[in-house]
Image (cartoon, rainbow, N blue to C red):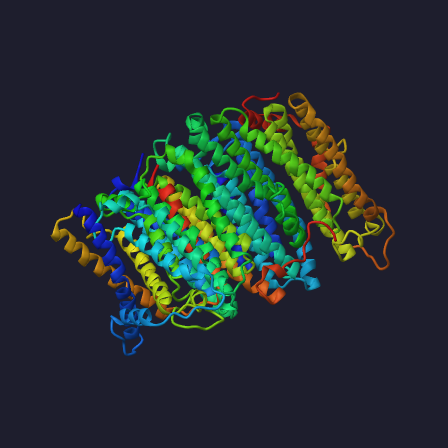
Amino acid sequence: MIAWLLALLQTLLFIGAAPLLSGWVKVAKCRLQNRTAPSVLQPYRDLAKLFGKTLVLAEHASWLFRSTPYIVFGATALAAAVIPLVAVRLPTAAIADVIVLVGFFALARFFLALAAMDIGTAFGGMGASREMTVSSLAEPALLMAVFTLAMTASSTNLSTAMQHTLESGLVLRPSFLFATLGLMMVAVAETGRVPIDNPVTHLELTMIHEAMILEYSGRHLALIEWAGQLKLMIYAVLIANIFLPWGIATGFAPAALLIGVLAITLKLLVLGVALVMVETLLAKMRLFKAPEYLHLAFLLCLLGMLSHVILEVG
Amino acid sequence: MIALQFMLGLPFAGALLLALLGHSRKAGWINIAVCAGTFAAALSLALGVLDNGPLLSPGKLFYIDAFNVYLVVLTAFVGMTTAIFSRPYMQYELSRGRLTSRRMQLYHAMYQGFLFAMLLSLSSNNLGILWVAMEGATLATVLLVSLYRTPESVEAAWKYFILCGVGIAQALFGTVLLFFAAERVVENRDEALLWSVLHGGAAQMEPTVLALAFVFLLVGYGTKVGLVPLHNWLPDAHSEGPTPMSAVLSGLLLNVALYALVRMKMLVDGAVPGQLAGHLMMGFGLLSFLVAGLFLHRQSDIKRMFSYSSIEHMGLMTFAFGVGGPLATFGALLHMTVHSLTKSAIFVTVGHAAHIAGTQSIEKIRGLIKTQPAVGWGLLVGTLAIAGFPPFGVFTSEFLLLTATMKSWPWLTLPLLTGLVIAFSGLFRHLQPMVYGEVPAGQVAVQANMLPVALHLLIVLWLGLAIPGFLAHWFDQATALISGSSLL
Amino acid sequence: MMTIDNLSLYEQAILLLAAMVLFTSFALLAQTRILNLIRVFAWQGTLLAVTTGMVAVVSGQHHLYISALLTFALKALLIPWMLHRLVLRLDIQSDVESVVQPAVVLLGGAALVVFCYWVALPIVQLSTLITRNTIAVSMAVVLLGMLMIISRRKAVSQVVGFMSMENGLFFAAMVSTYGMPMAVELGIAFDVLVAAILFGVFFFQIRASIESLDIDRLNRLHEVEE
């Protein structure tokens, strides 16, 4: 019973902390670029503001358009629920399968693309097609990375995989090196960050994700934005906890849980800074360069898998 | 032993000396003198080996047995006669302004360097050093191919460099695998690449690894032999380099590469059950033989044409070594000799013919026999010999090969005969007008030294009429080494 | 059965370095800027030297220290430096090469790695060395160098491919047998050095004859008459 309660708490923490991570990234970015930073809590305020606004719907919007924000948020929140954040061996871990996770993302993206085309504006269709191009290349890479992990742990269950890594101690696995790098590149592409997409501009020539949600307003927009922040957090937690799971609680003792919270906070802070560094150092790529970037990500993940097969077993 | 030191030391010293003096007018003579000395040393080495059996130098660096000693003599001999041809030929090129004296320096130094590298790879006991020397031979000749600095020659040299470099790298990988297999059965790892050690212990080596190693070695050394489909560099390098270079490349380098391949086959045969190495060599050999024969028909450059003929003959020899057995091996060894002698004689003649016509284009070379009978007859007789007409030695060796094939692979006789006919017709359709055709206006004879040609062709004729007893005995010893049983 | 979990940290580091050497091979395949290409090549040499040093530490084979030093001097310092200087002297440092179908080339490279794994399997099973799992990787470096020579059209890139192939060969000898006998290894190093010098000479000859270093424009010789 307490375990289920903990699982629920962890999910709520996950969903609640997601805007905080986005806030931290923004602050770090401003600091790095010598600009005055907004408060870390700014994303919360934005969300609150959006929730309070009246909804404006396009004339031809169908039920698809109206229900998509809930589906997207729901799918992303479910994905967040299965990922071990501060503790492994929670009851939700039983369904914490990486393939399910990828499925949740695909579901959300599918509906988002449909909704973008639903209203029939040019931007919506363009955004949908670009998003699909990027994700059709990113998804194989993502799967390859998680398979590498699964082959090492002999399980596609995230919680089991983390425990396996914890138990085997520090092992310099070439496959993990490649898979981490590949997964990071995929994460950058999938969450719409520089150099693939820029979340802060609405420049029609280059935008991908923003073009799809251009017609949304009010609480719909708030949900989609929140889901986006959640996705960033999910990827960050995945990278942090799969490849460096140290600190995560393996029991339910309060001390262990506290350490777990501290550890994940620290890891996310560091990852946020790393993301900011990348975004500051790199310029956004031209759209047709994106496939090259994703090929590299795919290659890294593939190399990860190959080096697992060739070097680490047998 | 002293002969061995002289044989290797002379060309090495010659290379250094000519690197300093290569531009002087006497360089050609020095070149000849060094080559003659090398040949004398090689001969005395051969006599020693024939009398006392295989020679293993102290330190086990060098190993000379009946197989490589005859190639050593052949190499030194063709090196010497080509040097005799090269002196006036290169002087003529210099006077025509196609070369500068600095390039003559390079040419002479590299000529000796090339001979040194080849003699080293032939006499080395260490299969790793064999590889190093083979690569060294490529490096020594690559700048000679581009000696004229025309766009074509630079292209040919680049192709030669890259293709042979890539090819020979595969051979090194094969050598690594061989070392891997050998290291497991030989106690002292420093000796695990020594031929004298390996040949005895071959049977214990792991067959799978050796088979894999042989595939890589075949691709690697096969590139240098000029086996189809790895032959692309060969016609280019032969046609664009200076003619003496073509003569030694065709007559010697290909032989040395084939020698390396056969040595490897001997090792593999000892350990791998079945005839894997033989079958692979037969396949590649036959393919090269047939394809090169067809390509002969569509050449417009006389040196290119004869280099395809070289590919064809190398294919035939590879095939014969692949067939194995004393008869085929004996034939292949004989063919190696007569092909070297005939082909270098032909290239020497072709060099003169190109000087007479002022071009290498087959269409513009006409009526040689009227302008300069010696060159015309030389080309005619040389081509007759290489096409396998009796009574020349090439006929004898090809006859032996056909007989051997009929014995063990009767159905392959047909493609072999077809290939011979194709190659023959290809050569003669181009040859006839060049020798007998209408003389173009203003074509005059050049100063030609036909001594090397006459010498080579006479030996080939002699080998065709009657192989002298000591030579037959000599070949037979090599045959016994390679195929396990002697013929005579 | 050798899994990475029950190896010592040093041995794990060898595997990690080997994987990084493989990665540099892929980076060479994908890199289109000439100076970066040379830089990546120098990194490959450095990683190779470090790997060799590490193997020397673990295996106690003292001659490998010499090989490591030799590799570092030759492949990480001397040859990249020579190439770099040549590029500056030929004034082609800002050349960008367009690789035809980069994605296909990279995937082809990955397929080669799988092929090497398959080919090397019987050898790996026989070996008892701790480095045996890297044999396939070393072989892949050789074949990737070959792929680079085939897929590139600039003389300098082809030379880098050639040299990286040599790296692979050295790597192969080192991991499958702890290095060839010293005499052979020195001979190979000598050949490589001479080859590097000759390549330099060739750059100038090619440039003088076709006023470019694009191998595509070396197209005068044909297999048969036109």
Residue A265, can we see it?
yes
Residue lying at 48% horizontally and 35% vertically, measured from the top left: B212
Residue lying at 57% horizontally and 43% vertically, measured from the top left: B223
Q: Is residue B283 above or below residue B32?
A: above
Residue B260 location, x and y as percent? 53, 37
Residue lying at 32% horizontally and 50% vertically, measured from the top left: A176
Residue B113, can we see it?
no
Q: Is residue B162 above or below residue B288?
A: below
Q: Which of the two residues, B182 or A73, is positioned nearer the viewer here?
A: A73
Q: Quadrant of residue B443 in the image?
A: bottom right
Q: Which of the two residues, B337 or A203, is positioned nearer the viewer here?
A: A203
Residue B318 location, x and y as percent? 61, 34
Q: Is residue C125 above or below residue B449?
A: above
Residue B123 location, x and y as percent? 50, 38
Q: Which of the two residues, A91 or B261, is positioned nearer the viewer here?
A: A91
Q: Quadrant of residue B382 in the image?
A: top right
Q: How many marks?
A: 0
User: Is B77 on the left or on the right of C191, as rendered?
Assistant: right
Task: Locate the N terminus of chain C and report the quarter of the image it occupies.
Answer: top left
Residue A295 location, x and y as percent? 46, 56
User: Is C33 on the left or on the right of A282, as rendered?
Assistant: right
Residue lying at 27% horizontally and 59% vertically, measured from the top left: A15
